Amino acid sequence: MIDTIGKEPTNERELVETRDFIKDTPNKVERQIQDLNDVYKHYCMLEDFSFKCEDNDIEMFWMQK
């Protein structure tokens, strides 16, 4: 998001695309918050069952997103 917003538009089309991207950013952030909440709930469930996740498994999960 930072790269897209920080890039200076070179023409009107890019300016419109950036404006549209900024307008949709709250929706994207909300989806990411929901994803994080889902992952956190899953993690808490695993922790309740004393299931140990390897650091590598957690890293691989995030690389797939």
Image (cartoon, rainbow, N blue to C red):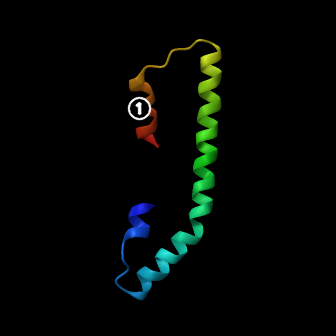
Q: Residue at x 65, y 16 (%)?
A: 48
Instruction: Tell me if mark 1 has few (under 14), some (14-19) or many (20+) residues whose alpha carbon lies within 10 angstroms of its own.
Output: few
SS state under label 1:
helix
Q: What x and y, as percent, mark residue 54? A: 43, 19
Q: Residue at x 51, y 15 (%)?
A: 52
- Res. 12 image quadrant: bottom left
Q: What x and y, as percent, mark residue 62? A: 45, 38
Q: Is residue 25 above or below residue 36?
A: below
Query: Would you name the residue on which mark 1 appears?
Result: 59
Q: How many marks?
A: 1
- Res. 50 image quadrant: top right
Q: Is residue 47 left or right of residue 11?
A: right
Q: Residue at x 64, y 45 (%)?
A: 34
Q: Is residue 16 above or below residue 37?
A: below
Q: Quadrant of the N terminus?
A: bottom left
Q: Is residue 13 above or below residue 1?
A: below
Farthest residue to the top: give it. Answer: 50
Q: Is residue 2 left or right of residue 39?
A: left
Q: Amino acid at mark 1?
A: Glu
